[in-house]
Amino acid sequence: MHRLIAAAVVSAVTAATLPFLVSPAAAADVTTTDGCLQSVPDPGTTAPVDICFTLFRPAGATQGSPVPMVLHSHGWGGSRTTDPASFSYLTDAGFGVLSFDQRGFGESGGQAYIENPDIEGKDVQRIVDLVAAQPWVTKQKPGDPVLGAIGGSYGGGYQFVGAFSELRDTGTTRFDALVPEITWWSLNESLLPQGVPRTEWATALIAAGLPTDALPPIVLRGFAETTATGNVPGYLHDFLDKNGPEWHVRNGRRLDIPVLFGQGETDNLFPLDQGLKNFSRALTDRARAKSIFVGYNGGHTLPSLLPAGGNLDIPLVTQDACSPTLGSPSFADLGLRFLQQNLQGKKSGLTGFGKHHLTTAAGDRCVTVPSVAPTTDVRLGDVVSTVGVGAPVAYPVAQGPLTIAGSPTLDGTITTLGLDNRAFLALSVGTSPVDAKIVQNNMLPIRENGIAINKPRTGVALPSVAVDVPAGQTLFLTVSPVSDMYAGFGSRVVGAMKLKGVVLHLPVTTS
């Protein structure tokens, strides 16, 4: 496996000592230093793994005048940032920055275990040890730096695995504030909801890991078996199970630090519900009261063509009406203010704590709600769909104007006659069933194994959304036997699914 390793690295560097610093260079009053440290071996091996980084020390940062530190890391398939200009908004504000290559990517060694607390969790802990060893970094006590973190997608995953693994291992975390974007609560829920793979994204993630041989063989074998059989093997589910906040919360851990969440509402890899669950479940009540949730149209977004979705331009532009509503021109600026308040103690005029701020599907309005739980029940009657083949059907729910902001669910009794019945659900908006488009490009499966006769199903999740339904248009429930996000993973046997006595629970708001 090809690795680009720094030319001069001391191989015996430990987490508690300073690394060999390679060719420090000053750029725009920021001293930039490259290096690598050693972390735990890959499972089944004995050789320590290099984790490589770039350290940015702002002008004036000394032992006598220390500064807080902000960690950064990249998305899946990426590598660390080495240009000081990329972090000038932080270094100009008096923060040090460390950007690092995660295991399996960039100059770092090993393979990617997708934010496993026993592997990548140890890597992040070693990085924090390194930061704590810098004399020019502010400390709360020896070994405990004043520390924040930024990054999106996989760069949000390292924040959670680092903070939660420290909490598990020591009873506390040295992170003081996090700013994760477009990241996950549960990899099994997001990649394989109800055991139905998000085909396009699974394929893209595997492809992104191939150039550096990043993925362990068990993952490649698992997805190959899933493709061949239509079912997720238990060993793949188990591999992914620990790699997200859901596992830690299930085991009694919650973070007691403030977090600024940014989540993509048109994200159909780590959808809006993943961020909402992190906000409501991964934090203590005290931390949530000091945290902010911002939803915007963007993230990992592929257009939905079957069934037809709205927001088809979102891959090219992120629409964020909420950061300006909260007093910042962009989410990055909002993040800076959040870090200044929590790491430097500066009063930056932040508001909106403990609430969800969601950009509507049109991208021109921010809806603020204290809860995303359903508030209104709508009795829909019977819903019928073919499985395996057929066309989407849109069932009218309510007339506009109204606003839906949160996480809708569905109750009913299900009857199926096939072997493994799969259909896909979403809210949609249009003037008629013919032109109704699914909201923010997301669908979720409803799955029933084997024959069922009037079997009760409650709390069936529909995609979380934020949408204004204007006057003259209708909110629909779209039910489809196929979805291009799950291409090839609908029912493999043609049949039918009937939902009887359907009740929709909708998060209707007047905000």
Image (cartoon, rainbow, N blue to C red):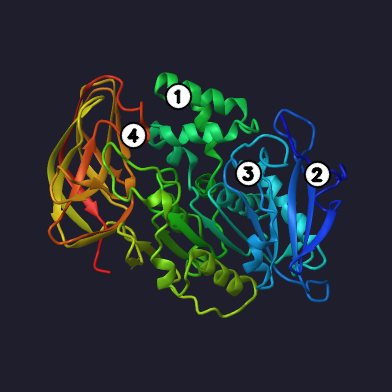
Seen at 57% across and 42% down, the residue is 76
Label 4 amino acid? Asp
Secondary structure beneath label 2: loop
From this viewpoint, is residue 343 visible?
A: yes
Q: Amino acid at mark 3?
A: Pro
Gap in angstroms between the C-alphas marked 3 and 1: 25 Å
* Sequence-earlier tag: 4 or 1: 1
Mark closer to the chain start, 3 or 1: 3
User: Disc 2 and disc 4: Cα gap in Å?
Assistant: 43 Å
Residue drawn at 19 percent across, 46 percent down:
436
Q: Which residue is mark 4?
A: 484
Q: Neighbour class for label 2 at 10 Å: few (<14), some, many (≥20)?
A: some
The residue nearer to you, when weighing 253 against 276, is 276
The residue indicated by pointer 1 is 226
Looking at the rendered structure, which numbered label has been put on residue 117? 3
Q: Are marks 4 and 3 in contact (CB under 8 Å)?
A: no
Q: CA distance from mark 2 to mark 1?
A: 38 Å
Would you place residue 182 above or below residue 113 in this image?
below
User: Marks 2 and 3: in contact by CB < 8 Å?
Assistant: no
Which dot, 3 or 1, sits closer to the camera? 1
Mark 4 nearby-residue class (10 Å; few <14, some 14–19, many ≥20): some
Q: CA distance from mark 4 to mark 3?
A: 33 Å
Disc 3: CA contacts within 10 A as few (<14), some (14-19) or many (>=20)? many
Instruction: Give the alpha-carbon distance from disc 4 to disc 1, as whole Å.
Output: 17 Å
Labels 4, 1: front one: 4
Disc 2 marks which residue? 6
Kind of residue at badge 1:
Thr
Mark 1 secondary-structure assignment? helix
- C-beta proximity under 8 Å, tags 2 and 4: no
